[in-house]
Amino acid sequence: MTVTTDAGTGAGAVGETDVGADAATGPGFEEFARSAQQRLYRTAYLLCGDAETARDLTQTTLAKLYQHWRRAGAAEHPYAYAKTVLTRIFLAERRRRLRDLLVLGRAGGTVPAPAADHADLRVTLLAALAELPPRARAMVVLRYWEDQSVASVAALLRCSEATVKSQCSRSLARLRTRLADAGLPLEGS
């Protein structure tokens, strides 16, 4: 919401405008955020496996996009740009948490226990995803949930296509094993 001044009367009028709306950048930030928020949240939830953390990750992503909306809004595919930002924030946060856990472990603190096994397929799958290293998890989510090509995942994560293929193959094998151990074998695997 912005305050605009009527040139003729000098009176202020309150009106709703799109933050960042500009003819050169296409739709404004608010419009984009409303339309992309749910999709970003679903991807964030698959990456982190926790509703609260996914909300935080989504909001952090939208805040970063807002800061750089001229560039993001001018991108050929703003949602792909947003997904890249989301994935990189997730990976940076996981690296930061891993460093904190390592420091805590060296200082003699206790490291939190992993999540317990669950019988429900969805919960078990999310728990199995959580066991994957952050980068491998991001590759699996982007490749199979977001249905991106190997080349686009490699470009997004700044690695080779061979790395994406091998990491996805290993990760899927781990997921299949984990689901089979939970008594939930996948058909056709």
Image (spheres, rainbow, N blue to C red):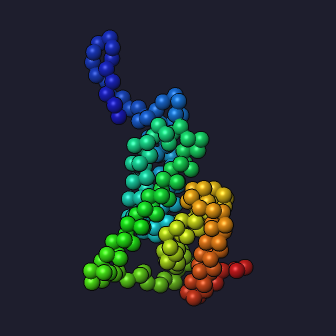
Residue 70 or residue 180, whichever sits in front: 70
Q: Position of residue 35 (x, y in %)?
A: 51, 46
- Camera-nearest residue between 6 and 167: 167
Kindly indicate the quadrant of the structure image that contains residue 154.
bottom right
Work out whether 149 lies above or below 16. below
Residue 99 in view: yes
Furthest residue toward right: 188
Would residue 168 be seen by someone viewing this image from the given angle? no
In the rendered image of this protein, does residue 27 appear above or below residue 59?
Answer: above
Left or right: where 99 falls relative to 34: left
Residue at 70% x, 80% y is 189
Q: Is residue 163 left or right of residue 104?
A: right
- Left or right of 84 in this view: 188: right
Identify the residue shown where x is 43% and y is 84%.
116
Residue 115 drawn at (x, y percent): 42, 80
* Quarter residue 138 falls in: bottom right
Taking 128 as reference, is 163 above or below it? Answer: above
The percent coordinates of residue 145 (x first, y second) are 60, 63
Q: Quadrant of the N terminus?
A: top left
